[in-house]
Image: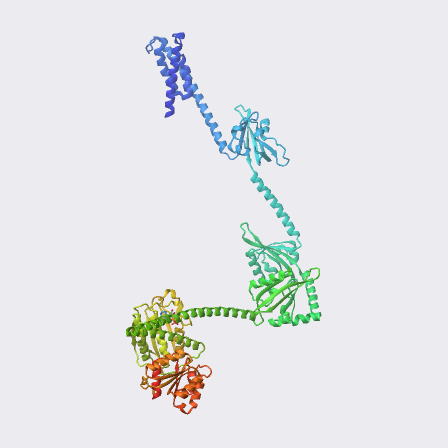
Amino acid sequence: MRQPLKHYGIAIAVTAAAILLRWLVDPVMGDSLPLVTLFGAVALVVWIGGYRPAALVAILGYFASAYLFILPRGEVGLTTFANVVGLIAYAFTCLLIILIGESMRRAGAAAGERGELLQVTLHSIGDAVITTDIEGRVTSLNRVAETLTGWPKAAAIGKPLETVFRIINEQGREPAESPAMRALREGAIVGLANHTILVARDSSERTIDDSAAPIRDEQGKVSGCVLVFRDVSDKRQLEKQAASRLVDARTLASIVESSDDAIVSKSLEGIIQSWNAAAERVFGYTADQAVGKHISLVIPPERIAEEDHIIASLRAGRRVDHFVTERVRSDGRRIHVSLTISPVKDEAGKVIGASKIVRDVTQQRAAEDRERKLLADAVASNAKFRALFDQGALFAVILDVDGTIVEPNRRSLEGCGYAREQVVGRPFWEGPWWTSSAALIDEARTAVAEAAAGKSVRAEMPYVVADGRERTIDMTILSVRDETGRTLFLAAMGSDVTERRQLEDELRNLAADLSEVDRRKNEFLATLSHELRNPLAPLRNMVEVLQRAEGDPGTVRRALDTMERQLGQLVRLVDDLLDLNRITHDRIELRKAHVDVASIVRDVVHAARPLTEEMGHDVQLAVEAEPLYVHGDAVRLTQVFGNLLNNGNKYTPRGGTIRVTVRHRADAAEIAFADNGIGIAADHLDRIFEMFVQVDRATEVSQTGLGVGLTLANRLVQLHGGSIEAKSAGVGRGSEFVVRLPIAAERPGTETPAVPTPQTTRTYRVLIVDDNLDAGSSLALLLEIAGHQTSRAHDGPSALDAAETERPEVILLDIGLPTLNGYEVCRRIRKRPWGSSVLVIALTGWGQEEDRRRSHEAGFDGHLVKPVEYAELMTLLGRLQT
Ligand code: ADP
């Protein structure tokens, strides 16, 4: 819409201009030719805007001129005949001008469109196009041509074609004649000129294909030329490669055909794909007979398995090099061959087959066999060497350079249990002594190859003797050379190190065990010193308190209570330690009797009351069967139950519940201690009975111990023929320890439950003999408080003197005395006339059955184990006096 409007605007402007022009020349022209300027205006507007605006000019212009210039001026009207004729002539002339102008305009537009189409086509076409005029000057070039020649359009237009389009011959590199010039000259289409190189503006070169055709005008006259060309460098490169591959393939084929070695290719399935002339000679089959068949055609039946090994190597992309083996010919004859097999890969690198080079080494083998025999003969005939070789303690085998066994020594055959025939002539790595492990066989093969290359190889390897046992050999393979450096043969030597290896392993394990024990021992010592120190501090404090109490009975009582508790703790520790010692030396003895476990458990619960109350625990005792007799040691069972209850007490946070149950299950007495304390992690449960084992304390309530309680308890229960089981649902979920003891077979007859022995009410003259002055004096103090008279001695001879002069009624005699020990003192006392009536009681650290027996034999009346408890001493005195 806009364009026509503009054109009408132009029409009006041009009309106005034409009228103005006529008006300007009016003084000169007068009334003649009033419409003259309008013809030009119509012609101009028809060219610019087409026939419609032009018609507007003609009409508008006429009316304006009629009014202004045609007589009579000042009006528009066809008043005269001349006016009518004038108008007709004017209209006819304008019509002609418009017709001619419009047709010219249309022809111009059509030509413009064609030219534009041509330009667009040239630019978008893949080939380079250059056009020239008749003189060979460039008139246009498309974008591809700009790129290939390196000439931008602006620079190229008007230049001679040879400047922009420089070409040379591929072979001679001399300037070539442009086909465009020939096309111009001969007026004919000039076809593709091959092997032309275009030299671009920047001197880079490209191989191109080109052609040229003349441009003719309507009359058929040559007016220029169009040159079309394209870059064919890549195509040429590919052609060259294909050509060279063809040459290579031909060369290769002729090499393969003329090779002395058989060259065979096969698929991964083993199907033969090619078979050269040498293969025909070596195996006796023609290519026609072999191609398409399976390779087993030439493999002896017993060697078929080799093929699997080879295929496996190939699949893994590995070559097989100089593999010496046997094959069969078409006539059934066996031949020795050396195979080199390489994988054949497709373009993606996938293994698709194999090519084999097969060399017939039958003759070479025969020569080697002769050489080998010579070597064996030499070994055999050299008596000194033979003796040394055979009598040595080492396994020794002589191998030829290939690694084939020539001669084994006696030790190696006897040591392995193989016969000479089983090994001679076989490759070393195929010997019967290797386990069937492929890795091991490879290792042996590599070792031989390295030795042959001059390296001495040492390795510890497992080997198998004839009866199938696996042992270990420490083996060295080395090469023996002559003075020129040529390898004469290889020697493999070794010694059996099985026992040494085992010993080393055992030592290693032992060392590991020892360090574990050592670790536990150290931990134990640390705990022990801590545990010993624990009761000592309050003891010392309370001594101090006593000294300052100035007889205040309340303070003294409290101090004494504490001291008693702490002392009890110390004594328990020492007892545990002593028991531990006995356990490790298996010296625990039980004094068994028919005892009622139910009442023992009751006593234990009762005795522990102060401890459990201190912790605020609720201890519930449920006795389901009573009495419940077992054949056992009441003291030891008390120790076991005390320990378990004590643990429940220690490992349950304040205010817990401990359930103690005594029941009869099948033929066992079952005593269970269940608490709702910190529990035990599952992975600790089975180790908890081991000596010194304590669960990591960091996560526990701050309780202490030596980590021997459960060990002792377990051992003691075992000695009773019973068992202890530990159960826990996990950390924080309580623990339960169940003791099972066999029920006693028969009911107790004569045995009576222990009746409390009356304590003595009498007072005695007592001689106390102890080389520890404090021990002696404290005991004396105790006895004096009870009203007895005491005297003291510190060694054997003074004890005898004191007894002689003082005639005590009771002698408390330490056994471990310097110069004269307690046994001896007792024996001598008994020999005196007064000596038989005096009560002699042993005081000792040793309380074993054996110790009691000895003291009894020496003439002692009683045996007390240190530290002596006052109540126990009084009970003993009471019993002895009756
Ligand atoms: P200790 O002197 O350390 O108590 P024991 O041999 O009696 O030695 O116990 C060994 C370990 O077993 C303890 O350190 C503790 O970790 C664990 N244990 C024993 N009894 C209990 C229990 N009732 N609850 C939780 N843990 C226990």
Return the x and y of residue 415 as percentages of the image width and height.
60, 72
The answer to whether residue 632 is left or right of residue 377 is left
Return the x and y of residue 438 as percentages of the image width and height.
56, 63
User: Is residue 150 shown above or below 452?
Assistant: above
The answer to whether residue 497 is left or right of residue 591 is right
User: Is residue 36 shown above or below 311?
Assistant: above
Instruction: Locate the N terminus and report the quarter of the image it occupies.
Output: top left
Please give the name of the residue rendered at 38% of the width and 23% of the height, measured from the top-left corner. 4
Q: Nearer the viewer, residue 155 or 716?
A: 716
User: Is residue 381 shown above or below 835?
Assistant: above
Q: Quadrant of residue 764?
A: bottom left
Q: Nearer the viewer, residue 286 or 698?
A: 698
In which of the image's four quarters is ligand 1 placed? bottom left
Return the x and y of residue 180 as percentages of the image width and height.
58, 29
Q: Quadrant of residue 238?
A: top right
The answer to whether residue 594 is left or right of residue 349 is left
Return the x and y of residue 472 as percentages of the image width and height.
57, 68
Asked whether residue 159 is in view, the answer is yes
Q: Nearer the viewer, residue 513 or 759?
A: 759
Residue most toward the bottom? 833
Q: Nearer the viewer, residue 225 or 759?
A: 759
Instruction: Locate the C terminus and report the quarter of the image it occupies.
Output: bottom left
The answer to whether residue 333 is left or right of residue 577 is right
User: Is residue 305 shown above or below 179?
Assistant: below
